[in-house]
Image (spheres, helix red, strand yellow):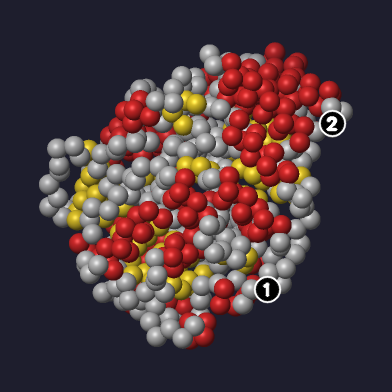
């Protein structure tokens, strides 16, 4: 067992700062999450990245924002700037269910205790710091701020809100994965440049006045235009999504009253060397010692898991991953992954089982365009919808090789794949026979050796029209994959379950679509448990359709269930097999004049 000294973590209190003999701090980070020194937790990644640049960094996790603000004062002023993040998850999804009920637990807080962060911590923390220290710059980051960089619909307030820089009063917003812009920012500050002059750093956003658009800039409809006309908001979104997914993006400008939000284009995808450098930082991989004896569920979930890549080219309408991490895949080297696994094997409670070797989607490791020049011109949000791009190299051999290397380690009894698998890439028939062979071998390897009893996949719906709005493959493909799964299980005498995820009330989904979903899943002998009601989250295509009523790409009108009654009437079909739902489902189907479905269901 490795014995860690308390100073192996970044300091969180004045006492810990003094113990290091520091008489100043360069950057103080405020986070809505408990401090877990692990590469899956944003504050730790930012802290370790800054530390590697030679800075003195402190973290204040879950500061008390009520009362006298002592947590915001206890470490004083930093030499360079404050960093603020709501945490690894959007605070409103963390706090509320899809029907806006307050959750009683918080997975990112010790002992799941609720109420340890405010709604919208990015805004609350930043405003407090600006009031206390008006002359110290504040840099915002994390998923909550990143996805609110421009005018966005907020489901919880049921309002169109301006880019978060306006309400937070922060000086700079770093969107997406922040290592590269942070390094650029710090290096230039170290050279003596003033914080407020740094307006050209890629992957940042800032607010100015009297901004003259450049020739290649995209000027969006203003926030006020969007408030007056939902169609303009829909048109804006198409530009925002396309630029988020381009290799060489344009700068985006949007006016809010007399100010202009400027969003600089993102960095190119991280190289293997750059992403390795982030994951190889000296994380303890453990919660701060002050949480001793307390359970942090989000940590327990990823404690024995390893992230092998970032990014996702799936482009699902309801998902924020590509908006935050990008659609291009940044993969770690095998050496970096194995080094992290060896660290895990030395943890005292490790029993030989890795819970996940994955990423945003489990099977995209080292995948990229064959001809990069084609990718550089592409602005499609998905590389696999409506069909797998012919330029995409979907070779599963690299993953197969990685799984085998990991399983050869003497300390590893079994490595599981807990992340979702894109079965459409496994079923696709490629012109290159080597790709077909690798897909087949990967499917077998996955099912035989890497399923911990249950394999998660996400068909999301059964109806073609709804799946089109979701940017998901046809449900027939799920049926084909299930047949393969069942065949391999029979062949090897395994008793494993396929667990499909489904969504109700997605834009474009009507009540009859949900009734058809119930019938089709019943025919496949599923009693659904992994289900959710669609929750609009900022910066997704589905949310824009929900709010505006238009498809931003075609400008056609889209039906969406919006009222509580409409949502519940869709959701009930997930539970057709429960006696308490039977009567109301039968009444609903009679109202919809679909008695034929009553016979099929009951």
* Residue 438: mark in rendering: none
Q: Residue at x 47, y 78 (%)?
A: 71
The answer to whether residue 563 of the structure is visible from this angle is: no
- Residue 109 lies left or right of residue 550; in this view the side is right
Q: Position of residue 488 (x, y in %)?
A: 78, 24
- Residue 568 lies left or right of residue 69; in this view the side is right
Q: Position of residue 357 (x, y in %)?
A: 64, 44
**Nearer to me, 584 or 255:** 255
Q: Are dots 2 and 1 in contact, CB under 8 Å?
A: no
Residue 521 quadrant = top right
**Nearer to me, 594 or 198:** 198
Disc 1 crowd rating (10 Å Cα; few below 14, some 14-19, many 20+) is: few
Q: Residue at x 12, y 52 (%)?
A: 210
The answer to whether residue 9 of the structure is visible from this angle is: yes
Dot 2 or dot 1: first in sequence order is 1
- Residue 293 lies left or right of residue 174; in this view the side is right
**Nearer to me, 274 or 359:** 274
Q: Residue at x 48, y 72 (%)?
A: 60
Task: Name the quadrant of the C terminus.
Answer: top right
Question: In this rendering, is residue 555 above or below 143?
Answer: above
Residue 555 quadrant = top left
Pointer 1 residue:
3
Looking at this rendering, what residue extends furthest in the right direction? 493
Pointer 2 residue:
494
| Separation of residues labelled 2 and 1 (CA atoms) | 41 Å
Question: In this rendering, is residue 501 above or below 306?
Answer: above
């Amino acid at each position: 067992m490795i014995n860690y000294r308390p100073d192996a973590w970044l300091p969180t209190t004045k006492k810990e700062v003094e113990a290091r003999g520091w008489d100043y701090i360069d950057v103080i980070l405020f986070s809505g999450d408990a401090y877990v020194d692990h590469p899956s937790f944003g504050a730790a990644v930012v802290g370790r990245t800054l530390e590697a640049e030679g800075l003195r960094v402190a973290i204040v996790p879950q500061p008390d924002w009520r009362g006298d603000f002592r947590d915001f004062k206890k470490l004083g002023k930093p030499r360079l700037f404050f960093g603020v993040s709501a945490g690894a998850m959007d605070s409103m999804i963390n706090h509320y269910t899809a029907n806006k009920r307050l959750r009683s637990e918080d997975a990112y807080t010790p002992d799941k205790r609720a109420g340890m962060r405010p709604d919208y911590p990015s805004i609350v923390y930043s405003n407090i710091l600006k009031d206390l220290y008006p002359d110290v710059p504040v840099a915002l980051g994390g998923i909550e701020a990143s996805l609110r960089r421009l005018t966005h619909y907020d489901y919880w307030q049921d309002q169109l809100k301006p880019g978060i820089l306006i309400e937070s009063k922060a000086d700079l917003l770093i969107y997406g994965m922040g290592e590269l812009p942070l390094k650029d920012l710090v290096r230039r500050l170290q050279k003596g440049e003033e914080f407020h002059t740094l307006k050209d750093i890629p992957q940042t956003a800032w607010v100015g006045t009297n901004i003259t658009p450049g020739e290649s800039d995209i000027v969006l409809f203003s926030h006020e235009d969007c408030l007056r006309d939902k169609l303009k908001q829909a048109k804006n979104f198409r530009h925002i999504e396309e630029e988020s997914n381009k290799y060489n993006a344009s700068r985006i400008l949007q006016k809010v009253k007399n100010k202009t939000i400027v969003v600089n284009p993102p960095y190119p995808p991280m190289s293997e060397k750059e992403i390795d450098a982030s994951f190889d930082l000296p994380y303890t991989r453990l919660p701060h010692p002050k949480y001793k004896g307390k359970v942090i569920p989000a940590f327990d979930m990823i404690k024995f898991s390893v992230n092998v890549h970032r990014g996702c080219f799936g482009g699902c309408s309801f998902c924020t991953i590509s908006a935050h991490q990008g659609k291009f895949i940044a993969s770690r080297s095998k050496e970096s992954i194995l080094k992290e696994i060896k660290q895990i094997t030395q943890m005292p409670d490790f029993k030989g089982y890795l819970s996940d070797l994955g990423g945003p989607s489990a099977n995209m490791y080292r995948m990229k365009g064959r001809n990069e020049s084609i990718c550089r011109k592409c602005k499609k949000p998905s590389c696999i919808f409506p069909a797998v791009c012919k330029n995409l190299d979907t070779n599963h051999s690299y993953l197969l090789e990685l799984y085998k290397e990991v399983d050869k380690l003497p300390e590893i009894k079994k490595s599981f794949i807990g992340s979702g698998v894109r079965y459409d890439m496994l079923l696709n028939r490629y012109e290159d026979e080597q790709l077909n062979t690798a897909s087949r071998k990967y499917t077998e390897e996955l099912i035989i050796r890497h399923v911990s009893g249950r394999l998660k996949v996400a068909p999301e719906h059964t109806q073609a029209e709804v799946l089109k709005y979701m940017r998901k493959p046809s449900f027939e493909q799920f049926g084909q994959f299930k047949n393969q799964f069942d065949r391999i299980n029979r062949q090897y005498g395994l008793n494993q379950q396929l667990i499909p995820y489904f969504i109700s009330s997605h834009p474009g989904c009507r009540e009859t679509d949900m009734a058809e979903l119930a019938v089709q899943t019943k025919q496949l002998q599923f009693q659904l448990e992994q289900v959710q009601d669609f929750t609009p989250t900022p910066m997704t295509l589905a949310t824009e359709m929900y709010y505006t009523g238009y498809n931003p790409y075609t400008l056609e009108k889209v039906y969406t269930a919006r009222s509580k009654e409409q949502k519940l009437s869709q959701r009930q079909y997930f539970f057709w097999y429960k006696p308490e739902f039977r009567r109301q489902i039968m009444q609903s189907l009679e109202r919809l004049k679909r008695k034929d479905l009553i016979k099929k269901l009951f």
